[in-house]
Every structure is written in C-alpha cells, then in structure tokens.
Image (cartoon, rainbow, N blue to C red):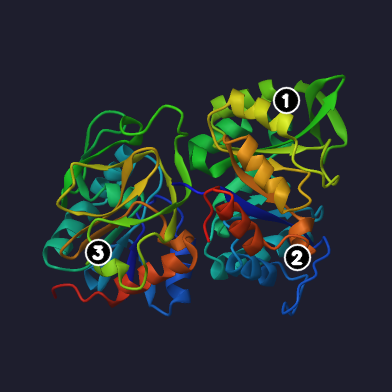
Amino acid sequence: MITKRIIPCLDVKNGRVVKGVNFEGLGDVASPVELAKYYSAHGADELVFYDITASAEGRALFTDILTETARQVFIPLTVGGGINTTDDFDRVLKCGADKVSVNSGAIKNPALVKEAARLYGDQCVVLSVDVKRVDGVFRVFAKGGRENTGMEAIEWIRRCVADGAGEIVVNSIDTDGVKEGFDLEMLDAVCRAVSVPVIASGGAGRIEDFLTLFKTLPGVDAGLAASIFHFGEVDIRDLKRAMADAGIPARI
Amino acid sequence: MIGIVDYGVGNLFSLRSSFAMIGAEAEVVRAPEDIRRADKIILPGVGAFEDAAAKLRATGLDSVLVEEARAGKPLMGICLGMQLLFEKSLEYGEHRGLGLLEGTVAPIRDVIPAEYKIPHIGWNALKFTKPACPLWKYIREGDYVYFVHSYHATGCDASSAAVTEYGGTLTAAAWRDNVYGCQFHPEKSGEVGMKILRAFCEEGGAR
C-alpha cells in the first residue's frame, strides 16, 4: 500500500536555512545540505526547498545549494520560490530538483502551469496555493499570503489541475502558525474537487495533528510542515511510528 | 564503466549523483561506440513512450542497445526506460519497444479501482516475484521505493521480479538473464535505492 508522505519544508535565504533549527549532532544547523541529509536519514519522504531570496546573488547561491543537496540526498526534492517562467523550471531541474512548485508565478502568468506540464510532464508541476477564508469563501492569496487575488480557491485549483498540475500543496493561511491542527474543512473541499495528490500544509503542532489529518481525510496524500520539525517539536521517526501504530500506511 | 544513456529524455543528474555516491564509475553516453565501451548500461527515461521510442530509433541507439543486451551486457531500464524494454506499449495508441522482454505496457487504470489516484506517486513496498533476482541482494521484501507512473508492464510473468500493491497488483521490476527493469526510481529511493544500484553494479552479466 502506498504510504502517506511526511515532507519537511526548508526556507532558504542567501544559501542558508532561515527558520531556526535546533538539533543535536547537526554541525551546521543553517546549512541546507546538512539539514537535508539529516532529514533524509531520519525518515523524511520528500523535501521541499523554498527559495525566499530576492537578489540575483542569492538566487545563484540557492542553485549551488540545490546542486550540492541533490548530489548527496536521494529522496524526491521539490523546489519553490521565485518560479515565474519555464526558464525557472529549467534552472532548478538542471540542478537536481525533481518537482517544481509554482504559486504567485502561476497567478501572474496563467499559462505557466500548462506550458511547464507540456515541457516537463504533469508529475513535475506542483501547484502551491495560499488560501484564506474571506466572508466564508476560500480565496487565493498571492505574495506570500499578503494579497487577496479575489479568485475562488477551489475553482483556481481545478483549473490548474486541468492544465496539468500534478500535485497540490494547500496552505491554509487561517491555520498556519496556529499549531492547532490542519485545516480539515479546506482540505476536504480540495480533495473533493480534484483527483491528483493533495499535500496538507499549515497548522500542524504535534503528532496527533497528522494522525487526525490522515484518519479524517483519507484523500490527503501528504503532510508538510517546517518549524515543528526544525525545532524538534516533532521528530519524524516518532511521527512515522505513531502513524503505523494508528494503522496509517507509513514508510519506516 | 557504467554508461547512462542520454537520448534526450529526462534528467540524468540524480542518476549520476547516485553512482558517484556508491563509488561506481558512471558516464553519460550518447554515441554508439560509448555504449559499446560501457561495461553496463542504464536506460533512464521520463515522459511519453512514443516520443522516447522514436528518439531511440532516430539516433540508432535502439539497435545498439538490443545488440549489447543480446551479447550479455547487463542493462537496466528505469521507469520509462524499463517500459521501453518490452515488446510494445498501449500508451496513446500502440508503439513498439525494444522487445528484450516479453510483455505489453498498459495503463495501470486497467487493474486499479476508480477511487485510486493516477499517477501512482509515492513510496510503496516491494513484493518479490523473483526473490533470486540479483537486484534484491542487499534489500528485503517489504522495503519501500519511490514510484511515479501511470503505466506498467503486463503479460510479463516470465520476467516479473517484483510487484507492488495499489488497489491492484502493479509490476514493479523485471529481470531476465542480464536484462533488468525498475518501474520505480532507485535514484530517488534513499538507502534502499542505493542498495539496488550497488547490486546492479556488482552484477557480472554473461560477458
């Protein structure tokens, strides 16, 4: 049986991991390469690298880091941040990324998903979407969740899947950082709308939140989180064991 | 030297890195003479069968691969590269493969229920149909490997080396003599994948 995936997300700025990391036995806690190796050895099923650099120098550093990581880590790598054109896809795929995550880039250029899927295959194109309730309606937000695009989220996700998005990362702005669990209502709405893998993001605070997610919504394929893994609040090995004990398929 | 065949299909970065990691000498090869020079051959591939098969034919590499494999050189196809080893594929029409293994590549939808998502993406467990396959030398039945695919080999009982369960039974690997195929990506399957590649590197073939 296919397993539910656990995916740590690393925010990288100027070649360094941004959010605080607190691990024993990790020499350089801000090194994305070291952290990626650590996670890979400790049960992560996949890794997401998110480039939050704005400058050209930072971008070059990011691709160097990505290349070095892909040389040493042999689980699927997804790259996001600053992906606006198919040239951006090309740049990170050449450095060893397996999938590329688009967010604002797809909003600015609605042809991007279709073009990228044609060039690199659906399995390569991940749509990441920041969603927030506004007057009871799920709306797509852009620019790191700061700007309401006015677009209805489920419609947007459906359209991108029709264009070839192979996976969807649903990041709930409403639950992000709250650490009281994933946004089950929002995720359920997305799962009902599309038949590609759905990755839940935003809201995990403890192991139980993942168990509730996978038990309540069998249509969700993966759980993504950042700081709870980086700060050691949730150890992925413990999480995987708890999943297996709860009857949720997990790779241990 | 392990020759990773570059025929313009897919990204070879991870495969090259994987062999470097396990200390095997690997080169990306494009010319027929380089493929003949290699001790072992890896045939990678992602994308559509028809396009990949056409590229192999256009470059004349199809006949080189068949000759080398028939002469006993170890050859491993990965993902679409595995599918190309079979007689034909039913992906968008009917297309001829290399014919090194008996069987037909068909949609996985034919054997799995409608509620299962396609492609089959993620980590799934191997069930050995040929426990003696040399690729399994360092791993155990039940170990997880990483899949991304919508088609798989069928009618291949003679060569099936492992299957995986996804609402139905999917062909995960094939083996006959010196010809190997992995539907999953060993280069993305962590330690288990590295062990499979190492076992392939140690395989002597019939030279």
Element on which disc 2 rests:
loop
Q: Chain of mark 3?
A: B
| Res A153 label | 1
Q: Which label sits in the foreground, 1 or 3?
A: 3
The amino acid type found where label 3 is placed reads Pro
Q: Residue at x 11, y 66 (%)?
A: B71
Q: Amino acid at mark 2?
A: Gly
| Marks 1 and 3 on same chain | no
Q: Which residue is mark 3?
A: B131
User: Would you say residue A91 is visible in this rendering?
Assistant: no
Q: Which residue is mark 2?
A: A15
Distance from the alpha carbon under mark 3 to that under mark 2: 45 Å
Residue A108 against residue B27 in the figure, above or below = above
Looking at the picture, tell me which residue is in the foreground, A63 or A239.
A239
Badge 3: few (under 14), some or many (20 or more) residues near its Cα, within 10 Å? Answer: some
Q: Chain of mark 1?
A: A
